[in-house]
């Protein structure tokens, strides 16, 4: 059993709280990604699970076993560090074998398992090379093989792709996901990259300033952010203050009526809109749609599309991603249009 349960886990460094009281459950065989900007507490949380950082308060259970105070060597977890942490004087095979030697595994068993682990990451032909003779992607595979060779109950990956170029990142995130699925291995993946998180995860844990902002599937977090921070971090470039009256009708701060799908009656909040879900037109939207008039303030050509900044009549700035063949120019007036179900309503607490 390798289900992970965090119960009110907290980490403090003197007066600074690095991770606020956190409770969550990670299912057996699940890949969960801790996602957020630098300094949000995601790596600290990962290291507490791995035993590399002491827990200030709370409990960590793996398969029902309390591991809160156990050292890393007794947790049977595979860890891939951001810089891979390979021994430069050891060959690929020796690096992979190191964890098994520390566990006093027999030599024939070490050889068998090292060969199997290197084959799994397609590096058997490079077993005799030193790390400096490998590419970044190959070093990453060695680190992954070293983590897997001990047959861990949990795999922990701390920004494992951050040192690779874009093409290698794409290849390796696919390989990691395929390996994780084939082994049905409970895995925690730490990253600040939204695309990585969306493409490899069963669920996301979005963090900010040591606090868990939202836990959900990639689709839930991407389409229905629970807070303004999550919306902004997940690419909702427009956060428009709105009011919802008792009948469920919406209005902007200037009083312009808008239709909002899924908003509760009688509340205030933010309408989160993605730039790519908006369009520009010379006329207002047809009945059943939303539109607001404004002036094109600037545009940026991006090849296959153009990013516009539109200043609405109530002075709100809206970002719109339009067709590269569009005819709008700075100074032009236009209508920004969107469907009622295109946005996500985020209710804000009353002051």
Image (cartoon, rainbow, N blue to C red):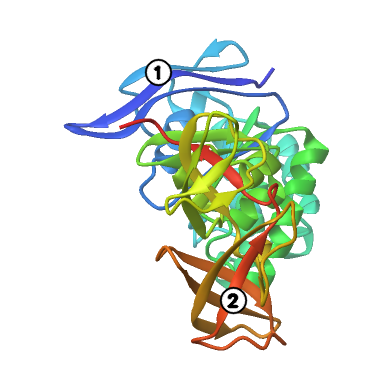
Residue in the picture at 40% in, 66% down: 315
Judged from this view, the residue extending furthest toward the left is 15
The residue that mark 1 highlights is: 69
- Residue 120, compared with residue 123, is above or below; it is above
Q: Is mark 1 in CB contact (under 8 Å) with mark 2?
A: no
Residue 173 in the image: state x and y as whole percent: 69, 55
In this view of the protein, which residue sits in the foreground, 80 or 271? 271
> Where residue 334 is drawn, which disc sits there?
2
Choose top left, top right, bottom left or bottom right for residue 55: top left
In this view of the protein, which residue sits in the foreground, 348 or 9? 348
**Quadrant placement of the C terminus:** top left
- Residue 73, compared with residue 99, is above or below; it is above
> Where residue 132 is drawn, which disc sits there?
none
Give the spatial CA distance, label 1 vs label 2. Answer: 62 Å
Q: Residues within 10 Å of mark 1 (few under 14, many from 20)?
A: some
**Quadrant placement of the N terminus:** top right
């Amino acid at each position: 059993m390798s289900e992970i349960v965090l119960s009110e886990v907290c980490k403090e460094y003197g007066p600074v709280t690095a991770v606020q009281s956190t409770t969550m459950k990670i299912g057996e065989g699940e890949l969960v990604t801790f996602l957020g900007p630098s300094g949000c507490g995601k790596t600290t949380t990962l290291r507490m699970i791995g035993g590399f950082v002491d827990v200030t308060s709370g409990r960590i259970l793996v398969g029902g076993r309390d591991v809160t105070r156990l050292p890393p060597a007794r947790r049977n977890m595979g860890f891939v560090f951001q810089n891979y942490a390979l021994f430069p004087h050891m060959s690929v095979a020796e690096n992979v074998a190191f964890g098994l030697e520390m566990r006093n595994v027999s030599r024939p068993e070490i050889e068998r398992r090292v060969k199997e682990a290197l084959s799994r990451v397609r590096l058997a032909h490079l077993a005799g090379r030193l790390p400096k003779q490998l590419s970044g992607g190959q070093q990453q595979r060695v680190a992954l093989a070293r983590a897997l060779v001990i047959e861990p109950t949990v795999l922990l990956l701390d920004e494992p792709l951050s040192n690779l170029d874009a093409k290698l990142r794409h290849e390796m995130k696919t390989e990691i996901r395929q390996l994780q699925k084939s082994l049905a291995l409970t895995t925690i993946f730490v990253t600040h990259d939204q695309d990585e998180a969306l493409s490899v995860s069963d669920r996301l844990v979005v963090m900010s300033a040591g606090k868990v902002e939202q836990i959900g599937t990639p689709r839930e977090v991407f389409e229905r952010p629970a807070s303004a921070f999550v919306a902004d971090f997940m690419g909702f470039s427009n956060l428009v203050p709105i009011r919802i009256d008792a009948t469920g009708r919406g209005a902007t701060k200037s009083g312009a009526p808008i239709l909002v799908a899924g908003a509760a009656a009688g509340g205030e909040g933010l309408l989160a809109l993605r730039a790519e879900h908006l369009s520009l037109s010379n006329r207002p939207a047809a009945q059943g749609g939303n539109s607001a008039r404004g002036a094109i303030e600037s545009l940026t050509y991006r090849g296959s599309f153009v990013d516009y900044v539109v200043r609405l009549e109530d002075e709100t700035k809206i970002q719109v991603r339009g067709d590269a063949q569009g005819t709008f120019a700075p100074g032009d007036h236009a209508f920004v249009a969107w469907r009622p179900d295109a946005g996500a309503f985020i209710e804000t607490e009353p002051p």
